[in-house]
Image (tube, coloured by chain):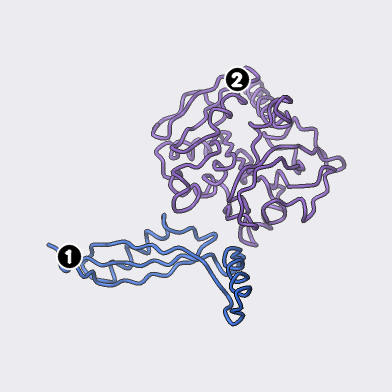
Amino acid sequence: MNVGVVTFPGSNCDADARWAAGLDGSTVHKLWHKDTSLPTGLDLVILPGGFSYGDYLRTGAIARFSPIMNEVISFANRGGLVMGICNGFQILCEAGLLPGALIRNSDLSFICKDVYLRVENDSTPFTISTGSSSQQPTVLRIPIAHGEGRYTTSDADLRRLEDTGRVVFRYCDPDGTVSETSNPNGSMKNIAGIVNDSGNVLGMMPHPERAANDLIGSADGLTIFRSLAAFVERTTAATV
Amino acid sequence: MKTYTAHVTVTLRRSILDVQGKTVEHALHSLHMPSLTNVRIGKHIEVDVMAPDSETAQQLIDDACQKLLTNPVMEDYSISITESSTGVTA
């Protein structure tokens, strides 16, 4: 798989994202926010976590107008895979590639801890190798680290997301039960990650790149990168 | 062309719980000021704008609010325009 990871001024998870995305032997390109083109043959663009432009004005509000975002938006509109992690999710919402917004956590504090995520939809390119099913949903343990992660959107958009299975990850208890106590930040319906209408753009607040090795607590995040690699391999095989 | 100063007030939309405002409200109540309610906390943006008249200035700022200064998913805004005291520029 060919992966590009964008570095904005203030990104701080770009190196981790490049490392995690390259663990399976994928080619990883370092992309700069001022770039006006993407490398040819790219399969996936990752917008990493951090505090792009110091979170000035609103999280992601200024990064969304970076030169490279024009390319990312047209790449996504052509069906290219885009994954926004944490600040990357906030940027995707500001850019209009995903509905809704991420606002201040309900307890007003920055939260940095492991959380459990229920994989709600295993048919997206980001989750096809998670082995999740509605009878037995897969639960992943992945850390969050954010001050503004409370997902909010209009009632109409929320209904659309739910009705079309576009909520991909929900905060849950270790056994997979979605409860109020397992919701760390007050997100609507415990939403931790969503995809766009065509399923090729994912935004998620938790950091899979920080859960890519058992030595550092969890390797559950790898299943997302493995899913992407498997999806790319499958689609490439289908088109050859 | 005149120079105007725009004051933009940005608050969370009414439909979104303003947890910061609620927290400050609780703090006020614990300071024995129970008659103070409905605290809402937002942002204040000041910006100078050159325009032939205040209507055009208003339109320019409204456009800026919709494109960058605010996010309609979560925020409401109001604009107040005053002619800048620095006077008329060429």
The numbered mark 2 sits on a residue in which chain? A
Q: In the image, residue A146 lies at what x, y percent?
A: 60, 46
| The furthest residue to the left | B90
Say if A214 sits above or below B57 in the image: above
- A8 on left or right of A139: left
* Placement of the N terminus of chain A among the 4 image quadrants: top right
**CA neighbours of label 1 inside 10 A, class few (<14), some (14 to 19), many (20+):** few
| Residue occupied by mark 2 | A26
Q: In the image, residue B25 lies at what x, y percent?
A: 59, 71
- B63 on left or right of B82: right
User: In the rendered image of this protein, which colour is used for chain B?
Assistant: blue
| Residue occupied by mark 1 | B1
Q: In the image, residue A215 lies at what x, y percent?
A: 72, 24
The numbered mark 1 sits on a residue in which chain? B
SS class of the residue under badge 2? loop
The answer to whether mark 2 and mark 1 are in CB contact below 8 A is no
- Residue, x 28% and y 72% (percent of image)? B82
| The furthest residue to the top | A25
Q: In the image, residue A230 lies at what x, y percent?
A: 69, 25
Q: Depth check: A73 or B45 in front?
A: B45
**The image quarter in which residue A25 lies:** top right
- Residue, x 68% and y 39% (percent of image)? A143
Measured Cα–Cα span from mark 2 to mark 1: 57 Å
